[in-house]
Image (cartoon, grey):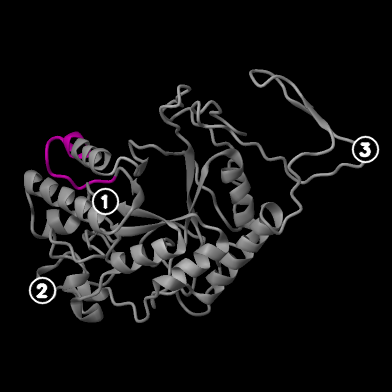
């Protein structure tokens, strides 16, 4: 996947991918999904109850999924759809039709094509990354959120200045766009949820390491538990440790037929992850990758539908939700203890609490 690989250390064989002046990055023709269908992504995401989809627009390798005017390393340089394809155009149009918020991962500080192949200096690198950012904001929105991490391959002396320009561009050009987690509005917690056969995740969404909430209503700062992958496995990039950010037909070391199936997350595990995150006022970030065709694999789609059904039956229109139990609530709306007194025979599975964010965020930890 040329949107992710880091060019110099990827495990993909480069012996037949060195033409065209892209080495050590992969040739753009490596990107060639046979049946890319963003409507398929939206349909299964909506069935699961997702409110936002975050698409990797360009990762550390620098390969852009739109025909940018600021790089020669994009879908326009590939043979996919004759060089006229535009994943972001299809994605944004479909998301807007489905009413799903648009988010992009855009690694503005790490673009190995620009630093290792064409070897741009800091000033030109910054100009092009800001240009690509502006293209995405102008043409492929409205952008609800950008997801940044701290990886970089910036050859300038002051990477802070690059980030200052990035944040200034977003704040002035699209002030309603959220930023997470690097220096942003949404804080990534230090632990990641695992979704199959591992220890139970840390149920705390403590924001102690994040920017403090504002009680005057100026902003709120939820946390985000990230790192959930639909296919469970190590986050490596070798045959011994395959990267499970992407679809693998055989989810195990070696990726060979007949190996023990590690598999992907089941609906029960994901439901538990939902309780630990959304149930505690945080954001649940799942990584669900299409397969090599560009569609959701049938086994993944089934899990997504099962999760959506469970959430709807528990909390949605298909549930037996009662907004007020026959009992009464005692306790002041302030510091202290609130007591819910149940009547005879009252039973419940979950208690939901909502925080009014209009005066600012006051709950900083749910555990």
**Residue at screen point 93% across, 38% down:** 344
Residue 211 image position (x, y, % from top left): 41, 28
If you read the primary sequence from the N terminus, does the residue marked by circle 2 or circle 3 appear first?
A: 2
Specify start and end residues of the magenta stretch as a single range: 151-163
Q: Is residue 252 visible?
A: no
For mark 1, give the secondary structure.
Answer: loop
If you read the primary sequence from the N terminus, does the residue marked by circle 3 or circle 1 appear first?
A: 1
Query: In what quadrant of the picture does the N terminus appear?
Result: bottom left
Q: Nearer the viewer, residue 145 or 232?
A: 145
Dot 3 and dot 1 residues touching (CB under 8 Å): no
Dot 2 and dot 3 residues touching (CB under 8 Å): no
Q: Which residue is mark 2?
A: 20
Q: Which residue is mark 1?
A: 107
Based on the picture, tell me whether residue 264 belongs to the magenta stretch.
no
Please name which of the two marks, 2 or 1, marks the residue nearer to the observer.
1
In this rendering, the answer to whether 106 lies above or below 171 is below
In this rendering, the answer to whether 300 lies above or below 164 is below
**Gap between marks 2 and 1 measured at Cα:** 24 Å
Q: Which residue is mark 3?
A: 344
**Residue at screen point 17% across, 48% down:** 130
Q: Main secondary structure of the magenta part?
A: loop
Query: In what quadrant of the picture does the C terminus appear?
Result: top right
Please name which of the two marks, 3 or 1, marks the residue nearer to the observer.
3
**Gap between marks 2 and 3 measured at Cα:** 76 Å
If you read the primary sequence from the N terminus, does the residue marked by circle 2 or circle 1 appear first?
A: 2
Please name which of the two marks, 2 or 3, marks the residue nearer to the observer.
3
For mark 2, give the secondary structure.
Answer: helix
């Amino acid at each position: 996947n040329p949107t992710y690989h880091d060019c110099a250390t990827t495990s993909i064989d480069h012996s037949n991918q060195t033409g065209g002046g892209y080495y050590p990055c992969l040739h753009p023709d490596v990107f060639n999904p046979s049946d890319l269908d963003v409507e398929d992504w939206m349909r299964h995401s909506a069935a699961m109850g997702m409110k936002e989809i975050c698409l990797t627009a360009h990762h550390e390798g620098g390969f852009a999924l739109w025909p940018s005017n600021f790089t020669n390393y994009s879908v326009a340089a590939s043979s996919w759809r004759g060089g006229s394809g535009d994943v972001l155009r299809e994605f944004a149009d479909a998301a807007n039709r489905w009413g799903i918020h648009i988010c992009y991962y855009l690694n503005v500080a790490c673009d190995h094509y620009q630093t290792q192949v064409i070897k741009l200096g800091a000033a030109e690198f910054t100009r092009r990354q800001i240009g690509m950012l502006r293209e995405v904001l102008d043409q492929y929105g409205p952008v609800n959120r950008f997801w940044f991490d701290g990886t970089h391959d910036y050859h300038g002396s002051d990477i802070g200045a690059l980030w200052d320009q990035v944040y200034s561009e977003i704040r002035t050009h699209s002030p309603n766009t959220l930023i997470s987690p690097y220096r942003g509005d949404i804080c990534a917690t230090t632990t990641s949820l695992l979704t199959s056969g591992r220890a139970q995740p840390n149920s705390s969404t403590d924001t102690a390491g994040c920017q403090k909430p504002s009680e005057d209503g100026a902003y709120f700062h939820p946390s985000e538990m990230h790192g959930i992958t639909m296919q469970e496995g190590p986050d490596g990039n070798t045959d011994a440790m395959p990267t499970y950010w992407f679809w693998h037909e055989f989810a195990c070391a070696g990726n060979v037929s007949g190996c023990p199936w590690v598999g992907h997350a089941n609906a029960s595990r994901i439901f538990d992850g939902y309780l630990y995150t959304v149930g505690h006022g945080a954001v649940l970030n799942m990584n669900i990758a299409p397969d090599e065709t560009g569609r959701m694999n049938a086994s993944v789609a089934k899990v997504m539908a099962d999760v959506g059904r469970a959430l709807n039956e528990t909390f949605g229109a298909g549930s037996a939700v009662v907004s007020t139990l026959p009992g009464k609530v005692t306790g002041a709306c302030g510091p202290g203890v609130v007591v819910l007194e149940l009547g005879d025979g009252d039973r419940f599975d979950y208690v939901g609490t909502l925080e009014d964010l209009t005066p600012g965020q006051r709950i900083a930890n749910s555990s």
